[in-house]
Amino acid sequence: MAIALPWEYASGLAAAAGAIGAALALAAPPKARAVGAFLRETALLLALYGLWQLAGRLSAGGADHARDRAAWIERFEAGVHLPSEAATQQLVLGHPVLVQIANLYYAGVHFPVTIAFLVWLFIWRRGDYSRIRWVLVGTTLACLLIQLMPVAPPRLMPGFVDTGVAYGQSVYGTGFGADELSAMPSVHVAWAAFVAFYLWRLAGRGWRWLGPVHLVLTVLVVVVTGNHWWLDGIVAGVLLVASAWAVTGIRAAWRRRRTPDGVPVPVRTGPTDEPVDPRPDVALPNEVGG
């Protein structure tokens, strides 16, 4: 139901994949270089997974106030009139099949959908891949940084049911190693929103709906299983938007090449790559008066 891969193993696999990918980048055959590029991207994903596991391990060491923070979130949500997670969960508890499907969706869909989307992007929309991949990296790292401050999920609070434990489907008792106190923000929701937004923008009409459907199902599933608060998903969405803006700004600044007076400098494509003066009819200072 879930991949049991400790952060140490994930980091080792990431290092191995990255090293092989870097070596293949020097290979002459185009197919070998393509495999190398794929391995380097796999290494990046494994590194993110390892960091997620490590962040959970570190945050678990300071869990004394995790329930206090969760209680504050519950009071805050009530104050801004967000729906009650407990009431939402009660809507499905009387339907065992729905609960078990929700447990399976929470445990088994999160990683495969994101990886499948990235593979599709890598193969079919290669020109967009680099930019979009860095949005995912930035969002994930921001989530993991916040998760170093432990927050208890609803299922560990009074008035909630741990549906995973109730039906023997808990990822936390199967060697998965995911920290139980990394509720805020929700990486599940962050990645689902990431897939939903970019799939809607880039896929054809027949497929673009899959992303938003996955996002809606993910948000409902993380709540009805008692794994996240509404606010966890809201913060994850804000971090995704901030990461997208940051990546766009950084890439624009990196590509912007200007003269000191702010005039863009076109670059001649050729062996010299020498800057071309954009104002050929204007005399340069050293051309005036000999």
Image (cartoon, rainbow, N blue to C red):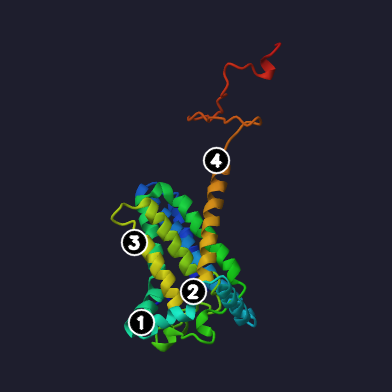
Q: Mark 1 points at which residue?
A: 100
Q: In this view, does 115 lie to the left or right of 145?
A: left
Viewer-proximal residue among 58 and 81: 81
Query: Residue 255, which numbered label?
Result: 4
- Disc 3, SS: helix
Q: How far apart are marks 3 and 1 (CA)?
A: 22 Å
Rendering quarter of residue 279: top right
Q: Which residue is drawn at 60% across and 82% down?
A: 67
Which element carries disc 1, helix, strand or loop?
helix
| Sooner in the amino-acid sequence: mark 2 or mark 4 | 2
Indicate whether 173 appears above or below 54.
below
Of pointers 2 and 3, the one earlier in the residue sequence: 2
- Looking at numbered disc 2 in the image, what kind of residue is underneath it? Pro
Any mark on residue 83, and which?
2
Q: How crowded is mark 2: few (under 14 residues within 10 Å), some or many (20 or more)?
A: few
Examine the rendered structure and indicate whether residue 29 appears above or below residue 110: above
Q: Which of marks 3 and 1 is nearer the N terminus?
A: 1
Please give left or right for residue 164 compared with residue 142 in the image.
left
Q: Mark 3 points at which residue?
A: 210
Label 3 CA crowd tier, 10 Å (few <14, some 14–19, many 20+): some
Q: Are marks 2 and 3 in contact (CB under 8 Å)?
A: no
Query: Are discs 1 and 2 less than 8 Å apart at CB?
Result: no
Quadrant (top left/top right/bottom left/bottom right) for the C terminus:
top right
Q: At which x and y percent is residue 63?
A: 62, 81
CA gap between label 4 and label 1 equals 49 Å
- C-alpha span from label 2 to label 3: 25 Å
